[in-house]
């Protein structure tokens, strides 16, 4: 994933409302979200290069998603970041315990931001960890945004998406069509609002939109994850490339 906006316990009907775009090279082979044959409790897309995923849910109310941390000078990790999501979904390990294990293995992966959650009547926990900081965070109720830096870094598309989600939630409805329309925003940031992540002006500009389009790389899918007040979890996906 490359941008995620989510509201945790901010809606009377939905403890979690999460919107996400996955950005990737168009040539990378990918399977759309479906039940995994080798793990039928998982519903997720799949990276057909390494076998992991960027976002998924399970029949037991587990959720996970990952974004890259943009740093072109950092060394490449030994393992795929998609394993961070897939491995959590395959287990029943509590959120905090899983994140502590990933923290111990942080150097094995390229830069990442990881969200993992459990949504069951007896336990509702949403956690965040990046291997670019030391701290594991168990998130309080609130509205959050995440792209290719740390949680709630105020990049223009992160702030715009959070504001857009807040406005939609004020209507007290969870309308998937409106969520997908928000994720389709292709407007670019003004030059003064561009981050400096070491990739140069032209790429910073192209990657500043919520929905990215370039000749070889861009938004390949949009996803909406909802957890209702009965702790039923759903994932809807739209594929573009």
Image (cartoon, grey):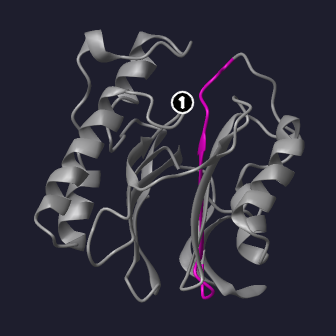
Question: Which quarter of the figure has residue 132?
Answer: top right
Magenta span: 58-72
Specify the quadrant that holds the C terminus: bottom left
The percent position of residue 152, horizontal first and vertical second, equals: 44, 35
Q: Residue furthest left?
A: 171
Q: Secondary structure at mark 1?
A: loop
Left or right, 70 with reference to 207: right
Left or right, 235 with reference to 212: right
Q: Nearer the viewer, residue 159 or 54?
A: 159
Please indicate, yes or no, whether residue 183 appears anywhere in the rendered image. Answer: yes
The percent position of residue 49, horizontal first and vertical second, equals: 75, 58
Label 1 belongs to which residue?
A: 149
The percent position of residue 70, horizontal first and vertical second, equals: 59, 28
Question: Which quarter of the figure has residue 130?
Answer: top right
Q: Is residue 94 above or below residue 241?
A: below
Are there few (<14), some (14-19), or many (20+) residues within 10 Å of tag 1? many
Q: Is residue 69 magenta?
A: yes
The percent position of residue 223, horizontal first and vertical second, equals: 41, 65
Q: Nearer the viewer, residue 115 or 207?
A: 115
Residue drawn at x 25%, y 28% is 188
Q: Nearer the viewer, residue 175 or 47?
A: 175
Q: Is residue 103 above or below residue 6?
A: above
Q: Is residue 225 above or below residue 102?
A: below
Residue drawn at x 89%, y 41% is 78
Residue drawn at x 37%, y 27% is 154
């Amino acid at each position: 994933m490359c941008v995620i906006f989510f509201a945790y316990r901010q809606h009377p009907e939905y403890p979690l409302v999460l919107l996400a775009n996955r950005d990737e090279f168009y040539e990378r082979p990918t399977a759309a979200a479906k039940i995994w044959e080798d793990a039928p409790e998982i519903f997720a897309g799949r990276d057909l290069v390494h076998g992991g995923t960027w976002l998924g849910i399970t029949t037991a109310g587990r959720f996970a998603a990952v974004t890259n941390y943009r740093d072109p000078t950092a060394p490449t990790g030994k393992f795929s970041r998609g394993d961070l999501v897939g491995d959590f979904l395959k287990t029943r390990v509590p959120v905090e315990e899983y994140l502590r294990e990933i923290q111990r293995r942080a150097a094995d992966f390229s830069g990442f931001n990881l969200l993992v959650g459990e949504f069951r009547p007896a336990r509702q926990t949403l956690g965040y960890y990046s291997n670019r900081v030391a701290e594991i965070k168990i998130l309080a109720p609130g509205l959050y945004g995440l792209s290719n830096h740390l949680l709630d870094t105020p990049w223009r598309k992160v702030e715009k998406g959070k504001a857009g989600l807040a406005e939609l939630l004020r209507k007290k409805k969870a309308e998937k069509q409106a969520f997908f329309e928000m994720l389709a925003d292709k407007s670019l940031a003004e030059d003064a609002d561009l981050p400096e992540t070491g990739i140069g002006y032209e790429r910073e500009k192209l990657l500043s939109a919520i929905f990215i389009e370039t000749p070889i790389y861009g938004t390949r899918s949009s996803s909406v994850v909802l957890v209702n007040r009965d702790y039923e979890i759903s994932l809807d996906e739209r594929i573009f490339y």
